[in-house]
Image: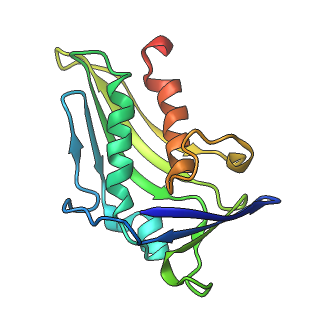
Amino acid sequence: MKTIVLLRSAGMALLLLGAAGAACSAVTPGAPVSTDKVEVSYRNPEALTEVSRFNTRTDWLNDLSRYIARRAAGSVPDGERLLVTITDVQRAGQVEPWRRGGSDLRVVRDTTPPRIDLSFQLVAANGAVMTEGTRRLRDMAFMSRSLRHGSDPLAYEKKLIDDWMRKDIDPARR
């Protein structure tokens, strides 16, 4: 999915998510992603706030899952496994289909922060649960922070994931 940043000033960013050049994934949106170290799944992809409230496409779910798996792979030591279940997502901004561009137009304001709710377990090689919990990831100051992911359509959500991983999963923090 291509992202074009049209405006970002005074706490407002206007993103136009175009389908030009975007390839459709053959994977079912929200399908579990599993590697030898990480498993990412969604409790009920169709009931996520982002999907049910804004009636948005769900192809971004796979991008988010793959990102979590890739990001965690470098943080989870060999022999351990991280199980992540995403229970809700509301992406930064909201879809405003009445604006020029139709249903792919997302307006991001500082009053519409990204939100991700998840549960996780970090499991040792012997099957023992080393740590587990539920997290409500929020960043009310998300627009004032620098973005490592630039113009990625999931930049704000990936930043939430990075912050959570640094706090709960990265080995140096354990």
Q: Position of residue 130 (x, y in %)?
A: 32, 18
For the rendered model, the colour scheme is rainbow
| Residue in front for this viewpoint, 122 or 38 | 38
Quadrant location of the C terminus? Answer: top left
Residue at the image position 33 percent from the left and 68 percent from the top: 46
Image height check: is 116 above or below 49?
Answer: above
User: Based on the displayed image, in which of its 4 quarters is residue 147 positioned?
Assistant: top right
Image height check: is 139 above or below 55?
Answer: above
| Residue in front for this viewpoint, 97 or 122 | 97
Residue at the image position 51 percent from the left and 52 percent from the top: 152
User: Based on the displayed image, in which of its 4 quarters is residue 27 positioned?
Assistant: bottom left
| Residue in front for this viewpoint, 75 or 24 | 24
Q: Residue furthest front?
A: 21
Left or right: 15 as drawn, with respect to 130: right
Image height check: is 151 above or below 37?
Answer: below
Quadrant location of the N terminus? Answer: bottom left
Left or right: 80 as drawn, with respect to 159: left
| Residue in front for this viewpoint, 51 or 28 | 28
Q: Position of residue 92 (x, y in %)?
A: 58, 58
Residue at the image position 20 percent from the left and 34 percent from the top: 35
Residue at the image position 47 percent from the left and 66 percent from the top: 50
